[in-house]
Image (tube, grey):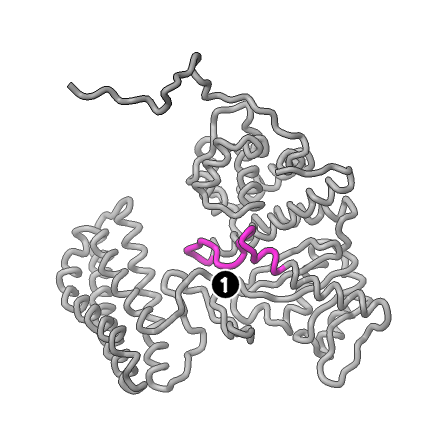
Amino acid sequence: MAARRRPASRQGELYTRSRRPVIAIDENHRYVQMTEELDWTELEELVQAIRMAKLKSEAGRPPHLRALIGALVFRATRRMTYRETEDQIRHYAPARYLCALTESDWTPDANTIQDFEQLLGEDGVRRINEYVVKRAVTEGLADPQVMAADTTAQEAAIPYPNEMRLMATFVSAIAVGAKHVGAALKGFVARAGELFQKAKRKLREFRLFGKNKAKAVRMRMTAQMADIVAGVQSKLRHALSFVDERRLWLRGFRKVAWSRLNRLRLTMETLLPQIRYWIRTGWVAANKIVNLQIPELYAIVRGKIGKEVEFGLNWGIRRLRGGFLLATLAKDKRELHDSRYATRAVRDHITLFGKAPRAYAYDRGGWSSANVAEVKRLGVRDVGLAPQGQARWLVAGAVKDRLISERAQVEAGIGAIKSGKYGFSRPAAKSAATMGAAGQRAVLGFNLNKLIRALAERQAVELVG
């Protein structure tokens, strides 16, 4: 006979403890104030317009837009994973109030929240952030007549792009992914098995002995690894084309694994010639791929002490007087270079607010006579582009001092969104699209917190939570 389990507490409860606690939420709680201040009807209409522009069909159950927008806002104001977001909304009373779920037992799960954010994308979250900034302008908390701008890098959570590591990652990913496709690539796994073992031995040799070898020896080892990868690439191309020709039916995770293999193959077809070019000349090829999983990433030379180069995506940041930020994601490495974004920032401002700012500040990276002329043509009266060399400021006195101050405060805003609270840099993202959404979400959270603090201060409310 099994021994009876001892209860956790020797003093039993007189009445069964309720698992439905009743708790009052402080009316000064930050999320209560946020719920009361935001126009959720307008937000739902905005999100619905974004959804309709991206969905192919409205088939299926209608989404809980109010709760999902609340989940996005909650996740923006404090950095957390999707699973943590689901748990907080399920058990944290202010979060349920923010999502309008206090009278419901339903909670959006992590997959639903993730799918919703992926559907919105970077452009959708940007439009929600623009709504928040316009609300701040309406409330007199932000002044679009004075703007400063700068560029920054969103660093990706990837390892340093060493050539040998990139090739080893490709081989290991192919070896694992091919097994998940099933019988369709069974022959490829058998034929390429010897090459996988050679790559494994070559990587071990490089890691154990390459550091103590001369540069020419390390280059030779890298070239040998490149030959092995080329062999795997050739066999993989033949195996995938065989699947296409036979039109083998793949479903579920096998189809996902097949798509991932094909994407890796196409990426390596671009990367391998770049590696061979580096081996042959010692120079890094133009538009070098720095990550296999996110090939859209690129190297951004920042010239910072201790971090000469960052690997990720380039962004343009605009700051209105009052501290509210607007972010623009670069489509490629050169689109938002300092000299180009100096005028692009003014054009984006006109698109959003209908007219150019009265005063505009930018650092010396955007200075040129052509940029000064273009900014004036767009309607800026006080041009505060910091001059280079012997050039003179176009503003003076109090106007110059104010624009220098506004320009310096852009760095503070960028530093805030890159902090651990918002997670602009090194987000947990596995695609460039997800990184873009994470960047806009960080800016959205920064602006939301700033808006609610300013409104509470105006009403003499002491926020809690």
Quarter of image, res 401: bottom right
Give the SS element for disc 1: strand
Would you say 140 lies left or right of 344 here? right
Would you say 273 lies left or right of 403 here? left
Residue 5 versus residue 295 in the image, above or below: above
Q: Which residue is mark 1?
A: 155
Majority secondary structure of magenta residues:
loop
Residue 460 image point, x, y percent: 77, 38
Q: Amino acid at mark 1?
A: Glu
**Which residue is rendered at x = 13% and y = 61% of the image?**
190
| Quarter that holds the N terminus | top left
The magenta span reads 414-432
49 or 95: nearer the viewer? 95
Please say whether residue 427 is one of the residues in the magenta stretch.
Answer: yes
Residue 2 image point, x, y percent: 18, 21
Please say whether residue 206 is one of the residues in the magenta stretch.
Answer: no
Quarter of image, res 157: bottom left
110 or 351: nearer the viewer? 110
Q: Residue furthest right?
A: 397
**Few, some or many residues within 10 Å of mark 1 (<14, 14–19, 20+):** many
333 or 52: nearer the viewer? 333
**Which residue is rendered at x = 43% and y = 39% of the image?**
110
Residue 398 image point, x, y percent: 85, 67
Residue 59 image point, x, y percent: 44, 34
**Which residue is rendered at x = 74% and y = 63% of the image?**
406
